[in-house]
Image (cartoon, rainbow, N blue to C red):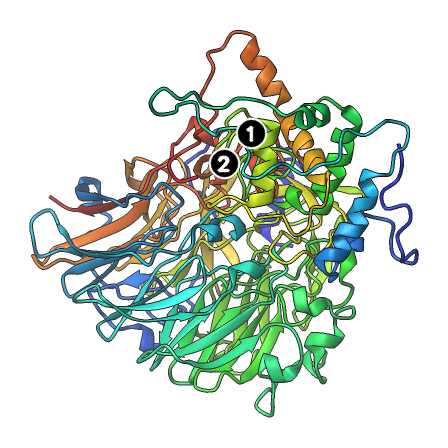
Amino acid sequence: MCSLFPKRAKPSQPDAVGDLLPGIKPLRVVVLVGLIAGCDDTTSPPPDSAPTEPLTISLVEIAPGPAEPVHEKSEIGRAYANDPEQIVVGRHIYMAFNCVGCHFNGGGGMGPPLMDNQWIYGGSVENIAASILQGRPNGMPSFRAIVAGNQVWQLAAYVKSLSAEADAADQEGSPEPSKFERSPTE
Amino acid sequence: MSLRLLRLLSLSLLVFGLSQASTEPIHGQTSPNRTLPLAPTFATTNSAEWSMPGKNSALTRYSELVDITSTNVKSLQPVFTFSLGVNRGQEAAPLVVDNSLYVVTAYPNILYALDLAQPGAPLKWKYEPKPSPAAQGVACCDVVNRGAVYSGGRLFFNTLDGFTIAVDAGSGKEIWRTKMGNIHLGETMTMAPLVAKDKVIVGNSGGEMGVRGWIAALDVADGAIVWKAYSTGPDSEVLIGAEFRPLYDRYRGKDLGVSTWPAEKWKQGGGTVWGWVSYDPELNLIYYGTANPGPWNPEMRPGDNLWTAGIFARDADTGEARWFFQWSHHDVSDYDGVNESILLDLEIKGEPRKVLVHPDRNGYVYLLDRVNGEFISAHPFAFITSSKGVDATGRLIYNEEKHPETGKTVRDICPAAPGAKDWQPAAFSHQTGLLYIPHNNLCMDFKAGNVGYIAGTPYVGAEVHMKAGPGGHRGEFSAWDIIDGKEVWTITERFPVWSGALATAGGLVFYGTMEGWFKAIDARSGELLWQFKTSSGVIGQPTTWRGHDGRQYVSVLSGVGGWAGAIVAGDLDPRDGSAALGFVNAMKDLPEHTTKGGSLYVFALP
């Protein structure tokens, strides 16, 4: 696979994700990390599009009156979530934007775990992308200003992949837990 | 090398299994015919109340009450409980003044007043500061609060989202609030303030977020900031001036808070002030520690990284620094220097000295002269591989084999990142002259990596996996001989002893465990005399006081959490050992032993 930031402007710096970011302004971060997304020309990337806001997909499984909650999935979300190459790129973005500092390798810390199958704000790739862009009230920052273009889909695809094991375990017969609530405080 | 270290080494060198906790104390010996250390006169108030977390500004956590003794403590029983309505780690101390009990919860930092003069201690009032929920996302290690302080009819405390607030103790009405921290930069506030004369002393948290540490004094009357001193940067902002008279050359020079860092790195250099502040009213000096330098990866910040991981003495009125001493220069293991410095008077070689005793995260109990900052001694109180001792001037001698390298996993660094002892405050018994230290027995594997600074996100640069130290237990509660610098007895516990300690004139010491036991121990022998199982793990600060009916009561919060208990408080996933900065790896079995909670327990004799 390709290296991160192959064309970055400061070759004298150590060649690592982190050191590219100190002290630089958000826009610069976008440019640098933007290189990640385009670094592999061997696969045709999924469509380049940010999630539509407000997203049409619902966060909850109930809806009042005769209405049904909207469970539709987007084509773009499905495309990224099923593309291992995009998930790998998503992991690099996850490290570069310090997502790892709060969620670690999926077990959580300052932020909730991502490797289980409990999702406070929805576990679809679309829900995860929306959480990344919008932020969430109990501590999730809004990353809208520093993720650009399809990076949010790459990130969301990687985050979704962390819970694949838990999802698989579920399908092996354990009853489906609520994916919409963690606890009253989170 | 201490006897203690020899004993630990002989147990088994770096064999980390898990074993059952043992409550059989292990005894050392003390020299006969010596003068015991004493609490300074300003700390011997003989008050039957408990108005600040440390009991007095020397932070001895000792009560002169004698009703509950080693003989009758076996009959101690709960007399009432109170649900805090918050299921996160409860680290605060219940305060009692004028027949009211005051306690502040973890986020959302609700301040409760209970009426002790009424049967069942009903709620008198509650004050809700309504901190921003977003603050939860930048608090490194659970959303704790270490307590309020009472002074002059007011309660002062900090909120997670960075406000210092004064509340009227009678009515529960807010008197003033001052914004001190900025959560957008990752700053939170978790420490308990200290009142020194007419000033409230507070500091910030956020050392894992690239925050620049500071301490500040606010006017008790209106919350106006009187002075503010940073822990890094130019002398003018550290409040280093003509009054600064450090004893050692390494602290002398212009703007060392800039020049001991790579260019500009001091701006995200940490040195936060989230621990304990003590105060000597006779010298008019406050004492407090500065936290770890950031990021954790030390290769990103060559230099001594002043003024982090050390202790400042400052003039309480002006904030001007008087002296400084660094526990861990160029810290490489997240050894924040914020642990309590307990102020004592003792004789050294026949000469009376005003000293402070400080059990540091790096594993040594330090004795310093609190007048001039002179190093007196440092003795290991835990198993240490990260350093080999200190030199004649108290400078740490690092073990280069345990020095982190970017991209390489360095194994078995002891103590682990939370240190031999984290925030959990020790107590000094004015009666036995011993220090009672709740602490950890943890080691870690540490893989440093590069990290970029993005304001408001973690700035750590390390992947950590913690584990039990030698013996397999993860916590201890030890009695410590301050003059000889050695352990007198110790009790091993399955989990880190994350609660504070309390000592009483009844010959007792109290502490809690993360399983939820609240224990009374014979202060001299270390014998377990009484224990009560509370509803959740205990990580709070026990206090004792006389009620309006004349009886002695003991109070403590139950409610597991904090960094050590984050796996339970935050529902973290045990499959990822690196979770919660690597603490989850050492606490995977905690969810089998306790659940979330948040309750006040009050005990008395029948």
Q: Residue B84: give its label.
A: none
Secondary structure beneath disc 1?
loop
Quarter of the image with the C terminus of chain B is top left
Q: Position of residue A99 (x, y in %)?
A: 65, 43
Is residue A97 shown above or below B432?
Answer: above
The quadrant where residue A12 appears: bottom right
Q: Label 2 is found on which chain of the structure?
A: B
Q: Position of residue A156 (x, y in %)?
A: 65, 33
Q: Residue furthest bottom?
A: B242
The quadrant where residue B184 appears: bottom right
Q: Position of residue B334 (x, y in %)?
A: 63, 54
User: Which residue in the protein does label 2 denote?
Assistant: B567
Q: Is residue B186 left or right of residue B550?
A: right
Pointers 1 and 2 in contact (C-beta within 8 Å): yes
Q: Label 1 is found on which chain of the structure?
A: B
Give the mark, 1 or 2, whose residue is nearer the N terminus. 2
User: Which residue in the protein does label 1 denote?
Assistant: B574
Quarter of the image with the N terminus of chain B is bottom right
Is residue B200 in view? yes
The quadrant where residue B430 appears: bottom left
Secondary structure beneath disc 2?
helix
Mark 1 residue type: Pro
